[in-house]
Amino acid sequence: MSETPILFECAAGIARITLNRPDKLNSFNVAMHEALRDAITAVRADKTARVLLITGAGRAFCAGQDLGDRTVAAGGERVDLGHTVATYYAPLVKSLRALPLPVVCAVNGVAAGAGANLALACDLVLAKRSAKFIEPFCKLGLIPDTGGTYFLPRLLGTARAMGVAMTGATLTAEQAANWGLIWQCVDDAALEAEVETLVQHLATAPTKGLARTKQAIYASAGNDLETQLKLEGEYMQELGYSHDYAEGVAAFMAKRKPEFTGE
């Protein structure tokens, strides 16, 4: 069995989290939740971090909740799943959405249940062509948690969200990309290189501008047009005084490659 539930490192502007319970298809247990919480907190505090990459070890990305860790006991004892959501899953999703930098998810295998919705909580999702996305909650008499009921209708539309949630149908990575559930489906052998190219690019991009882009796009779901236009004005005012904007303009005028600092 794995000694540590996640692997974490941060170097050259890139923070990397690898879910590390391959013997359990990287399914969630309390130890993994706590380790993820600590790692994401560390990323937020690290001023050198410009992008976060999340992936899985072994043949799966994440198979969701480990049913041997927090579920109905063999003797029929009940557990408070609402407490589990409030204590672990909801804070995880909110912490990823609140990070002031891009979060990239590399889905290297099956992403099921909370694992699928963890991926959807990230900003850019790339998946191996052989990867699959499954919302199996209906088979346990539950609802898609970890933001599933929020992400699915916004990404897929109501009809497809209902179908995926109520049937537990398996979506291939190609179908997920075609339906707009994820950013990109990549041939298996090309995923690692494609992801590395992306995170290397984001690690040298204008991070503050990307953070505000992320925040503005997510805010738009709850804003009317007038409110969104006002928010755009506020962010543009702020970013117009940033180092990276000045550098971007100077580099464009000088016909050279910009050197962004993230400020």
Image: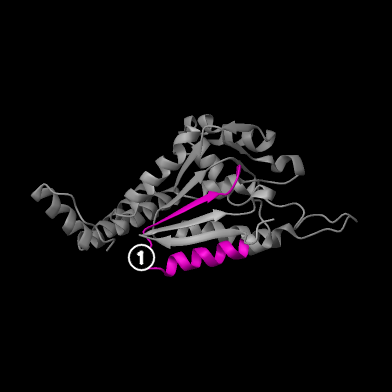
Which of the 4 quarters of the picture holds residue 261?
bottom left
Q: Position of residue 177 (x, y in %)?
A: 48, 33
Which of the 4 quarters of the picture holds residue 113?
top right
Q: Tell me what residue is drawn at x 50 percent, y 31 percent.
A: 179
Residue positioned most to the bottom: 45
Q: Tell me what residue is drawn at x 8 percent, y 50 percent.
A: 254
Q: Position of residue 231 (x, y in %)?
A: 32, 56
What residue range appears in magenta?
A: 33-60
The verdict on residue 8 being magenta is: no
Name the element at disc 1: loop
Q: Tell me what residue is drawn at x 47 percent, y 32 percent.
A: 187
As drawn, 15 above or below 46 = above
Task: Pick whichever, 36 or 162, lies toward us.
Answer: 36
* Kind of residue at disc 1: Thr
Residue under pointer 1:
48
In which quadrant of the rendered image does the C terminus lie? Answer: bottom left
Task: Pick whichever, 215 or 9, lies toward us.
Answer: 9
- The answer to whether residue 69 is seen in the rendering is yes
Task: Pick whichever, 260 or 56, lies toward us.
Answer: 56
Which of the 4 quarters of the picture holds residue 171?
top right
Q: Is residue 222 left or right of residue 244?
A: right
Q: Position of residue 90 (x, y in %)?
A: 59, 58
